[in-house]
Image: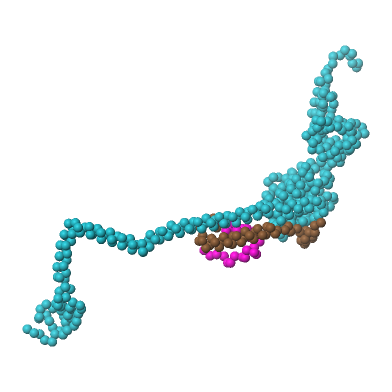
Chain colours: A brown, B cyan
Amino acid sequence: MVKATTPKSVEELPYEAAFSELQDIVATLEGEPASLEQAMALFERGQALAMRCTKLLDQAELKVKRLSGTELVDLEED
Amino acid sequence: MQPSLFAAAQWTVTTLTKYVRDALESDVRLQDIWVEGEISNSSRPASGHLYFTLKDAGAALKCVMWRSSAARLELTLQDGMAVAAHGRIGVYEAGGQYQLYVDRLVPAGEGALYQEFLRLKAELAAEGLFDPERKRQIPASPRRIGVVTSPSGAALRDVLNTLRRRTPMLEVVLVPSAVQGEDAPAQLVQALSQLNGLPQRPDIILLVRGGGSIEDLWAFNDRQVVRAVAASEVPVISGVGHETDFTLSDFAADLRAPTPTAAAELATQTTGADLLEKTKSAALQLGNLLLELVRLRREELTSSASELRYYSPARRIQSDRQRLDEFGRRVQSAQSHRLALQFSELEGWRKRLLTLSPLEVLGRGYAVVTRRSDGVVIRKVQQARGGISVRVSDGEFDAEIPSRRA
């Protein structure tokens, strides 16, 4: 079984990618029991992904833009 | 012709009144009508029913609005108010009165608009724009939401506050548009078109505006606007006016919300809080799975360790040794039997056989001599000539026969 190239650093992942990978890891561990070393590695990455998702959710801020002609500009709200 | 003073009456009050009632109530032109006039003598007794008179310069019409319809009235009736009433003509027999049974009451002028609304509704429905099959599913987790509304109204503020509260990890694209007046329809159409044409298209469009009269909301009944809503490839959620306001854009939208705030809520089915929950439960599941795996491995180790000990060479040797010991014991006990006699007899024969074996003979000094040229074993003197090979108890050596001896 050939693994893909080195996975991206967790800190660089956007929310969808991080959460999707987290779900994949859970599915993998639910399926065929891996070797203990593999399982530990997956577990640690999974934990890191979960923390990344939580952080992104906590820090999220609504981005509001206004279409002006063909440009998207920030909206000044009163 | 002079009426007879003593002619029999053709009618009773009841039969005559019933006749009048049937005549009026069976006339289709007197059912489902709009009447405009001025309110006077309005009253609302404890029963909850509404009684008033509609009048104009030439006549007066008694009206009654039953409690159920009256309860939904947004108008506060005042004498002198110009209104349009919708309903049917009927006859109240006990009171000897024809009256208008009112189910809808709106300010004067709106009656005409409402009829126009119904006409447009029929026309656009015939184009199939309101068909349920056309309506698309609203995506559950949008990343980008487009909003078409006035940039200065309360609707935008309400929508943004709602989105901020529920799904902060979201991008909103506002396309400002007039939401009433002459310019509104064209701007609304263009806004919808622009959002659909963005390189990064929104996942949902919210078409919203705050409450107002039927005239204020009229732009959302405009044919082009309704067609644009139906044609939008991006699913549209409409939230126009108050809960009881329906515009044709609402019918054409993929989903109608009663208010702008509700539209924002319907657009964000999965909230940030939901996502946080999912993340936490996934992390928990990870932990549980790993613990389970460790437990499984530990069990396997324990059982396979005992298997290993069972099959290892040490174990094998041990078992062999054990078997030998056992055999020895059996032999010993066997020797105490009659078999022991046979064993000792055999022992005697064994020793005799040993003495007769060639190796034993050689050990006593005899040799085996073979002629090297043809390998024949020399038993007689006359066979002895040339080179010979001599075999003794522990090996061989070569020799030459110099001459014969008699």
Tell me, yes or no, if residue B164 can be seen here. Answer: yes
Q: Is residue B314 magenta?
A: no
Is B235 on the left-hand or right-hand side of B7?
Answer: left
Instruction: Give percent across and percent down for residue A68.
Output: 79, 60
Count of all numbered marks drawn on residues in the image: 0
In depth, the one of B217 and B331 nearer the eye is: B331
The residue lying furthest to the left in this view is B406
Is B405 on the left-hand or right-hand side of B205?
Answer: left
Above or below — where is B225 with respect to B402?
above
Tell me, yes or no, if residue B376 can be seen here. Answer: no
Image quarter in which the N terminus of chain B is found: top right
Among the 4 quarters of the image, the one containing residue B275: bottom right
In depth, the one of B25 and A7 nearer the eye is: A7
Image quarter in which the C terminus of chain B is found: bottom left
Above or below — where is A66 with respect to B89?
below
Instruction: Give percent across and percent down for residue B181.
Output: 85, 50
Instruction: Give percent across and percent down for residue B314.
Output: 36, 64
In depth, the one of A52 and B216 nearer the eye is: A52
The magenta stretch is A1-27
Is A9 on the left-hand or right-hand side of B72?
Answer: left
Above or below — where is B34 with respect to A57?
above
Q: Is residue A26 magenta?
A: yes
Among the 4 quarters of the image, the one containing residue B198: bottom right
The residue lying furthest to the right in this view is B57
Q: Residue at x 68, y 50 (%)?
A: B269
Q: Residue at x 76, y 59 (%)?
A: A65
Q: Residue at x 18, y 61 (%)?
A: B343
The residue lying furthest to the bottom in this view is B402
Q: Residue at x 53, y 65 (%)?
A: A2
Instruction: Give percent across and percent down for residue B245.
Output: 78, 43
